[in-house]
Image: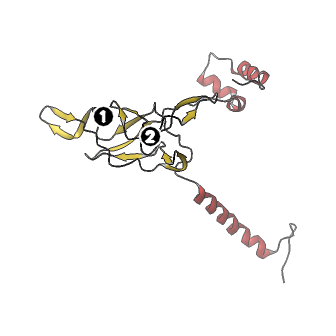
């Protein structure tokens, strides 16, 4: 005999609810990616080698037509893909190499990438190539591990962030700005793009 409570569910059905919720949470977690919340890397970004001293920029050579857009929707900078292993400057991009000690310090970097970037974002492709994100890595044949130092994109506050900001907190960060007035101005111009 099943007993029912005010919600119209039996005792057995109520016992099954937490396990169903757990299963749904596990499914949504399995759909998540290590790239969630990470930025795509663009050509003006920089990388670093754990055995070098300088931070060269990326050089996109695999294509010249796919851009990540800026806030206005205009083409900004080229997207870095798994094949883009050239750096700017090309000669000694990381300066000196810690794996090459000498009596006078370290010898110059002889950058020689081993294959393509790894840990790329497989769900977004540019001309069939996976895109590089902040967590992507590239190995050097000398022994260094190259990672993204700066993705190259700039984040800007949008209207929703201004609207939802705590005025008291903003006074701490920017005491000379009248943030309440700024919020009012943003609300007045809510139909306009900025």
- Residue 190: x and y in percent read 77, 26
Q: Are marks 1 and 2 in contact (CB under 8 Å)?
A: no
Q: Label 1 to label 2, Cα distance in Å?
A: 22 Å
> Left of 59 or right of it: where is 184?
right
Return the residue nearer the eye: 14 or 142: 142
Q: Nearer the viewer, residue 38 or 110?
A: 110
83 sits to left or right of 52? right
Quarter in which the C terminus is drawn: top right
Assess disc 1: are there few (<14), some (14-19) or many (≥20) residues with their C-alpha within 10 Å of its C-alpha: many
Name the residue furthest bottom.
1
List the residue tagged with mark 1: 94
Residue 62 circle label: 2
**Residue at 61% from the left image edge and 62% from the top image edge:** 26
Along the line of sight, the residue nearer the viewer: 180 or 124: 124
Which of these two is toward me, 163 or 6?
A: 163
In the picture, the quarter occupied by the N terminus is: bottom right
Front position among marks 1 and 2: 2
Q: Secondary structure at mark 2?
A: loop
Coordinates of residue 66 in the picture (x, y in percent)? 54, 37
* Above or below for 140 versus 56: below
Position of 37 with respect to 106 (left or right) is: right
Report helix, strand or loop for mark 1.
loop
């Amino acid at each position: 005999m099943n007993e029912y409570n005010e919600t119209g569910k039996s005792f057995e059905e109520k016992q099954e609810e937490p396990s169903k919720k757990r299963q749904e949470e596990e499914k949504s977690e399995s759909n998540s990616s290590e790239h969630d919340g990470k930025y795509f890397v663009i050509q003006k970004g920089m990388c670093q080698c754990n055995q070098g001293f300088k931070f060269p920029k990326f050089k996109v050579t695999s294509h010249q037509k796919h851009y990540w857009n800026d806030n206005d929707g205009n083409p900004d900078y080229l997207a870095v893909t798994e094949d883009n292993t050239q750096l700017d400057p090309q000669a000694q991009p990381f300066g000196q190499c810690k794996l090459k000690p000498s009596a006078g310090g370290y010898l110059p970097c002889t950058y020689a990438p081993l294959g393509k970037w790894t840990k790329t974002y497989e769900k977004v492709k540019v001309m069939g190539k996976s895109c590089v994100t902040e967590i992507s890595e590239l190995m050097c044949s000398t022994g260094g591990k190259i990672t993204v130092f700066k993705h190259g994109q700039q984040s800007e506050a949008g209207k929703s962030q201004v609207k939802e900001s705590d005025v008291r907190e903003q006074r701490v960060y920017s005491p000379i700005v009248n943030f309440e007035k700024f919020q009012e101005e943003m609300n007045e111009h809510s139909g306009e793009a900025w």
